[in-house]
Amino acid sequence: MKIRLRSFFHFDVAEVFDQGQVQLADDRPTLRDLLKEVTQRSDGKAQVIDPATGELDTEYFVLVNGRDLQCLELGLETELRDGDEVGIGMMHFWGGG
Amino acid sequence: MLTKEDLERYDRQIRYEGFGEEGQHKLKASHVVVAGAGGIGCPASTYLACAGVGKITIIDHQAVELSNLNRQILHWDKDIGQEKAVSAANKLRNLNPSIEIAPVTTQITGINARDLIKGASAVLDAMDNFETRAILNQACVTEGIPFVHGGVWGLCGQVTTIIPGKTPCLACLYPQKPEEHKPPPVFGVTPAMVAIIQVVETIKIIAGFGRLLAGQVLYINEGTMDFCFREAVRRPDCEVCGSRGDR
Ligand SMILES: [Zn+2]
């Protein structure tokens, strides 16, 4: 199963995977599985899952095929399908001066 | 009334269907507050001036430094040490002498914010920190003035348009003070791109055409050329615009 990643913050999450596509071994992987993989492979540069709570870090947002994680009924337990596109972004850009 | 010179200066945009002389007249009668004369404020005020916004107030209490010049395009080498609001106003007056430019060198605070923006058609967020944005958001919600937010970090940026009473406000989106790393890395092109989108939003608000980034946040990543929209959700318990607000 291949998932395409898009980055909406300063760390290019796609860069740590071949051609921006994550190969997940499990045949029914969830969004949580993917984000754990991203967190691990990014060497702490994308701490998407908060290790303390096991939930999405409050600084990040996640879009699955353009839909916000907050709008997904199963949240992090949403099952991913081959060809899905997952976008990861940070909400806080306070520069401008 | 548009003068003969206005009709010639703004001819190309007056030709845009849905804008026309009426739109130009609305711009001429408008007053936009640009909060900040830095990386966002310089390109933003430049394009607002070119477009013919009748009055632009540009607020900044800082002085020009050498490290500003990679992005703050209205400040030149000779301006180092000068107040940014004054430096910007001088260039804008040369760019378009037919409009009014009002530089303000006061720091925006919770005490003076409402007075500084009172009566404006829109406030364009060109700040460099969370606190002042929060102050401006509150002042705009209280005064019922559209607030066009933009922010950057590195090659990334975000833009959203806040229409008080209609859309979520900035405090709905960011109820807690985030961690800020100062000074953030930034290329000149990123605040410029964010600023131009903010200016388009401001022009549409004033002239009343097109569709706005209202109720959604546009995220851009120039490093990867990824762009997305994210829905902005209003918090009923928002301390600024919700039931816990002081409106
Ligand atoms: Zn709010």
Image (cartoon, coloured by chain):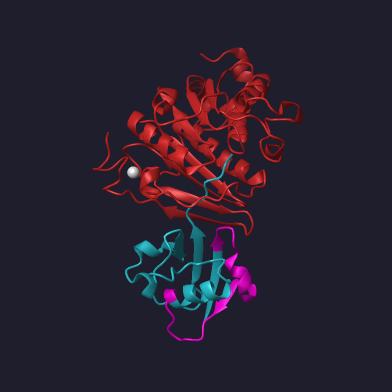
Chain colours: A cyan, B red
B56 sits left or right of B213 in the view: right
Q: Please report the residue visible at 44 percent of the width from the left and 30 percent of the height from the top.
A: B109
Name the spot of residue B188 as percent of width and height, x first.
67, 43
Indicate the quadrant where residue B53 lies. top right
Name the spot of residue A11 as percent of width and height, x first.
59, 62
Quadrant of the drawing holding the C terminus of chain A: top right
Q: Within the magenta stretch, is there residue B181?
A: no
Name the spot of residue B80 as percent of width and height, x first.
71, 29
Residue B59 visible in the current orientation:
yes
Q: Please report the residue visible at 58 percent of the width from the left and 67 percent of the height from the top.
A: A13
Q: Closest to the observer: A2 or B20? A: A2
Q: On screen, A29 above or below B144?
A: below
Q: Please report the residue visible at 55 percent of the width from the left and 71 percent of the height from the top.
A: A4
Q: Quadrant of ligand 1?
A: top left
Q: Within the magenta stretch, is there residue A21?
A: yes
Q: Please report the residue visible at 60 percent of the width from the left and 49 percent of the height from the top.
A: B184
Q: On screen, B55 above or below B152?
A: above
B43 sits left or right of B208 in the view: right
Name the spot of residue A81 as percent of width and height, x first.
45, 78
Give the residues in magenta. Answer: A7-32
Q: On screen, B95 above or below A87?
A: above
Indicate the quadrant where residue B112 lies. top left
B31 sits left or right of B241 in the view: right
Which residue is the extreme one toward the left? Answer: B243
